[in-house]
Image (cartoon, helix red, strand yellow):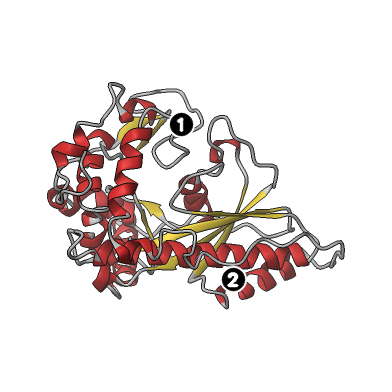
Amino acid sequence: MNLDNWPSTHEDFASLLPKVSGNKINGLNETQVRKASPFFWHPHDQHEFGKLATEVINIQRKSPEITEHYSRKAPRGPKIIDRSTAYHQKSPEDWTKIMKRFALNNESDDVRITEMSPLYVYEGYEINEPRIIIIGVTMDHDELDKIPASLANPASAVEVARQYNRAARACRELTNFILTQGFEAKAWAGPFASNLNMMPAAIESGMGTLGKHGSLIHGEFGSSFRLSAVTTDMPLISDEPRDIGAEDFCTNCQICVKVCPPGAIFEEKQMVRGVKKWFVDFDKCIPTFGEALGCAACIAKCPWSTPGRAPKLTQKMLDRRRRKRAN
């Protein structure tokens, strides 16, 4: 692929797909529960999509506006300090209040807690901390909605990069705070994957419900938000998964299916690593993702993402379910 010749097309990126299907690596049609395998956003020598992933990143780096956020000089937050030897004794309830207050005062828009599960760790990796703090940061929907992105107009891709950086700062600030209290903590920031598979942990923490488009839907933010996380041994009270009615909504809604340029979104749930869930065809999605500097059409056009609409939809869907049960 010649990166000096823009546009780099869907066909250019599709030509870099390896023989193995990304859907197979992700566990499509597998009936046994297992950990997720390292994949596209992991180090490029760990999977067969490394060359394609490299080119997707390289084309984004052709944009100075995006490179401002995806570079070593990007505002990704403070370095991690050494753990304090001073131990502050408080109840889990108190630590939960203190931790959440700190996070919300340091660039987080939502913060939730769940217990660690082996299924939240990618195959071949390990995490020793028993708890996960999930951080959510909202996106400027007007900027996200400027799709498709291009080198001439990268606004939506820049917004994604900007909020990944904010999420990174938030989790690193929180990690340092926890370390100063005498506990272990590690920061996990996107988009590049590492040990932690954030999506199932975020669902269990109540941060969101998996939508038909394969992204989370939040009860207040819709699909227009990004995640980071902190793993820790700080004693905390876990949050519960939240039912916002999006499951019922997605069953009947077809908007993301229709707006997806390559038609990558399945209309029905699929069996994936032993769990029936919404699923996006990776092999169809990623060439368009590369061409459009990240695409984002599905979450930008998701009805839940319109500013101010998610709380109303939540109330409407839950009220509808209660009426059905009453009848």
- Residue 228 lies, in percent from the top left, at 51, 57
Would you name the residue on which mark 2 appears?
Answer: 103
Using the rendered view, name the quadrant where residue 141 is placed. Answer: bottom left
Asked if one can make out residue 157 in the rendered structure from this viewpoint, the answer is yes
Q: What type is the residue that disc 1 sits on?
A: Asp
Q: Residue at x 20, y 49 (%)?
A: 4
Q: Residue at x 12, y 49 (%)?
A: 258
Image quarter in which the N terminus is found: top left
Would you name the residue on which mark 1 appears?
Answer: 45
Observer-side mark, 2 or 1, equals 1
- Residue 58 lies, in percent from the top left, at 32, 48
User: CA separation, marks 2 and 1?
Assistant: 34 Å
Say above or below: 224 vs 270: below
Asked if one can make out residue 222 in the rendered structure from this viewpoint, the answer is no
Image quarter in which the C terminus is found: bottom left
Provide the secondary structure element on which disc 2 rests: helix
Q: Earlier in the sequence, mark 2 or mark 1?
A: 1
